[in-house]
Image (cartoon, helix red, strand yellow):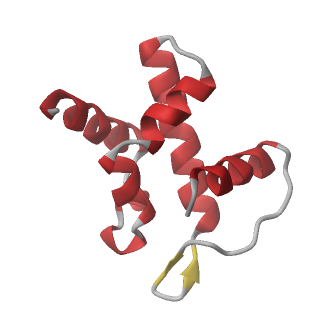
Amino acid sequence: MSKQKDSELLYLLANNNSTKGIYFYKGKDITMNVIIQIRDVIDIIKREEEISFIEAVNKFYDSKTYKVLKDTETALWAEPSHYIADRYYEERKDN
């Protein structure tokens, strides 16, 4: 999924609009779960780094952690958002 599409989904979520199923795990629509995790991790990055929402979005979207999160078979989406953020920061430390 493209950054633009994810940004649109975040916008829809923020405005309480419905979304179509995009992310599935074992046949179950988990789109809202994934989008909420993306939103929460971006909020953590924004708060920790004292940067704007757009800056946090761009940083997270460019990470390997984000790519793994979108691969629903990894089940990273089922972990707490602080765990996902920790993986993001570990990745940045390793680079």
Q: Relative to 94, is 10 above or below?
A: below
Query: Residue visible at 38% across and 56% down?
Result: 67
Q: Quadrant of residue 28?
A: bottom right
Indicate the position of residue 13 as horizontal and vertical percent values. Answer: 75, 50
Quadrant in the picture for the N terminus: bottom right
> How far across and how far down the image is residue 59, in percent?
44, 32
Is the residue 95 above or below the residue 75 in the image? Answer: above
Q: Is residue 30 above or below residue 46?
A: below
Residue at 61% in and 28% down? 54
Q: Is residue 89 above or below residue 20?
A: above
Give the image location of residue 72, x and y in percent.
42, 70
Front position in the image: 86 or 8: 8
Q: Nearer the viewer, residue 10 or 16?
A: 10
Q: Is residue 82 left or right of residue 28?
A: left
Residue at x 56% of width, y 72% of height: 23
In this view, the residue farthest toward the left is 94
- Count every numbered label the image shows and give the total: 0
Residue, x 54% and y 38% (percent of image)? Answer: 40
- Image quadrant where one finds the C terminus: top left
Q: Position of residue 74 (x, y in %)?
A: 31, 68
8 left or right of 89? Answer: right
